[in-house]
Image (cartoon, helix red, strand yellow):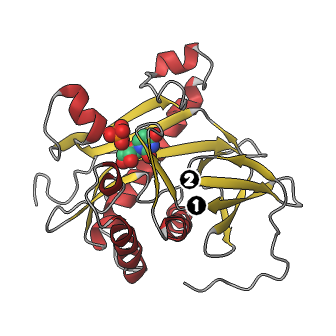
Amino acid sequence: MAYPPLVNPPAPRELLYEGKAKQVFATDDPRQVVVRFKDDATAFNAEKRGTVAGKGEVNNAVTALLYGELEDFGVPTHFLELLGPRDQLVERVRIVPVEVIVRNRTAGTFAKRYGVEEGLPLDPNVIEFCLKSDALQDPPMNAATAVALGHATEEELEELFDLAASVNDYLVARFAVAGLDLVDFKLEFGVDADGRMVLADEISPDTCRLWDAETGEKLDKDRFRRDLGGVEEAYQEVRRRLEATVGADLDLPDFDADDHDHEHHHEESADA
Ligand code: UDP
């Protein structure tokens, strides 16, 4: 992918924060930070550690591509510019400590928790909140708990829910044209300097389960978690397929502008 030449590319200054898969640097503008994507991988709350060659570049490129498209779809994000192979410029936000998980099929922790096999379609899809806390292993948390413990307001949670439903509507269709089945994914949101709730963090094979639509082959972090091999190749393949389908027509659900009821029933209903 080519990077547009910037007149004054913002330089990363001091390291503000280092997480498991990313570093965050200050810039000369207090409202903007640089996110650098690393090749480091962790799973099972950092019990399993490793590196996946090229992962940082894939996740940077995939996140930039999808956040640009989501902005066009009407979802506000923190993304500003791609700066280089591993770096992107984003708005500085206050991260809401609530992770939002969207599930279109059973998998992972959900399948274990409810004693069901993986891959069962979920209709309606399921949107869950978890407390963002590595120390507590991101425990699931209902809305009342999040509000009562002061992690978010009721209005913020409603916003997270509606935004997550819109992101899912877009991503299911977007990954489908790339021959990928979006099984589940995790989102994080932040409040920007103007008080706007925006999509933050990343959307990548680290944070999504993506299965080949034809064969069911796993093309995501489960290859690392479960020692399936071919991890690097799977990440590259997701990037390749997304880049090859930029601008393709998407089969998006039609819904009223302010009716985000996150249901996917459209053409095939009643009189189809
Ligand atoms: N996920 C994530 N970060 C987390 C927890 C989950 O990115 O801290 C993603 C995960 O990759 C999957 C989805 O959210 O795509 C649902 O994960 P689940 O709750 O099933 O947990 P897991 O089985 O991944 O531990």
Is residue 201 something one can see in this rendering? yes
Q: Check the image and report above or below for 154 versus 267.
A: above
Viewer-proximal residue among 204 and 80: 204
Q: Amino acid at mark 1?
A: Lys
Query: What kind of element bears circle 2?
Result: loop
Residue at the spot 46% in from the left edge and 36% down from the top edge: 45
Q: Residues within 10 Å of mark 1 (few under 14, many from 20)?
A: many
Q: Total marks drawn?
A: 2
* Label annotation for residue 131: none
Kindly identify the residue that appears in the image at 78 percent across and 46 percent down. Answer: 193
Q: Quadrant of residue 32?
A: bottom right
Which sits earlier in the primary sequence, circle 2 or circle 1? 2
> Where is residue 190, by image quadrant?
top right
In the orientation shown, which residue stands out farthest toward the right?
Answer: 28
The quadrant in which the N terminus is found is: bottom right
Tell me residue 73's x, y (percent): 49, 63
Residue drawn at the location 54% of the way across and 32% of the way down: 132
Q: Is residue 102 left or right of residue 271?
A: right
- Residue receiving disc 2: 21
* Residue linked to disc 1: 38
- Ligand 1 falls in quadrant: top left
Taking 199 as reference, is 52 left or right? Answer: left
Q: Is residue 134 left or right of residue 10?
A: left
